[in-house]
Image (cartoon, grey):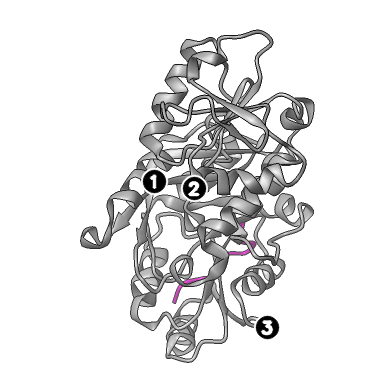
Amino acid sequence: MIEPPSAAPLSILLPFRDAAETLDECLDSIQAQTSPDFELIAVNDHSRDASPALIAQRVHDDPRIRLLDAPEPGLVAALNHGLHAARGQLIARMDADDRMHPERLARQTRYLAQHPDITLVASRAHLFPEARIHKGYREYMRWQNRLLTPTQIADEIYVESPFAHPSVTFRRAAILAAGGYRHGPFPEDYELWLRLHHLRLAMAKLPQTLLEWRESPHRTSRTDPRYIRQSFDRLRADYLARDPRLLASAHDLAYWGAGRNTRKRCAHLIDKGFPPSAWIDIDPNKIGNRVQGARVHPPEWLRRTPRPLVLVYVANHGARDLITAQLEGYGYRRAKDFICVG
């Protein structure tokens, strides 16, 4: 029989719903941790399969596991229920279809103990199974896994979610003080990262790959309308509209990307009172046109004084890297003179 920790310094928060097919793999990876001093808060989000029974079997043999029922349906309700019930000072998020590396908890706990100024630490993640990973998702992971330092994460926070949610460990008190997880028509994890960023709370990522992140057509991010492209665009615009850099440059904003799809994404921010003073595009057929009252210019137009604040709305990660290099070649500073937006 495994002994329960006298005072668990860390709680694993595991919401689950109808996860019987993958739950055993997930639980095996948790119970194989090299750091055994934790409690597992498994929150049943109104499952209709054998998931609760599988957890209950583990509870019988492992007193570190607590099985709770969410008070109402939905991931956010389950997360907040577990967050408030947890006894640990640290919370390690986990999903029922993923697997954690045996040293994940030890490494993240040690990092937060050594870095009291960091509120949240994630890790690199590896997508599996390989046959299900499409090119766009591979590119997203390449981008995500290169963001390690608090500065790198803050500089690109408006591009995409910089973390795999089940890879993060955070300080429970700080997240509760920030309001926990929020309900809304947006991805609950990315909204939390943006909120922490606006509260000036530092986030980091370990260079080790400590999470195996399962790709599946049944994943919540594939089936829930809160995770569609427009939900991310609206959420980013909400936070950009409160960003001090935009508030200081509201009358001199250059939007990079004058194509139809890009303009649709920009519209969320423009409608909040941030019209463009110029558009930037490389398409010669667009140069000289006027869009919403502002002229389309080639990139060379940015060699001017005073400089506008440039919002790079080009979604392709490879193209964004090229634009970043070009702007830096003009003397523009990342996150000061230009902001990349997903």
Decide which of tag 3 and tag 1 comes sooner along the chain. Answer: 3
Callout 3 secondary element: loop
| Pointer 3 residue | 72
Residue at 48 percent of width and 58 percent of height: 166
The three-letter amino acid code for the residue at tag 3 is: Glu
Dividing the picture into quadrants, the one containing residue 22 is bottom left
In this view, the residue in front, 273 or 47, is 273
For label 1, the residue is 140
Residue 261: mark:
2
Marks 1 and 2: in contact by CB < 8 Å? Answer: no
Mark 3 and mark 1: span between their CA atoms? 33 Å
Of the two numbered discs 2 and 1 on the same chain, state the one appearing first in sequence: 1
Crowd around label 2: few <14 · some 14–19 · many ≥20 (10 Å):
few
The secondary element bearing badge 1 is classed as: helix
The amino acid marked with disc number 2 is Asn
Which segment is the magenta one?
Answer: 1-10
Q: What whole-number distance in Å separates the C-alpha atoms at marks 2 and 1?
A: 19 Å
Residue 196 visible (yes or no): no
Can you see residue 139? Answer: yes
Q: Nearer the viewer, mark 3 or mark 2?
A: 2
Q: In the rendering, at what x and y percent does residue 226 appear?
A: 57, 65
Eyeballing the image, is 226 above or below 289?
Answer: below
Residue 219 locus on image (x, y percent)? 42, 70
Residue lying farthest left? 131
Mark closer to the chain start, 3 or 2: 3
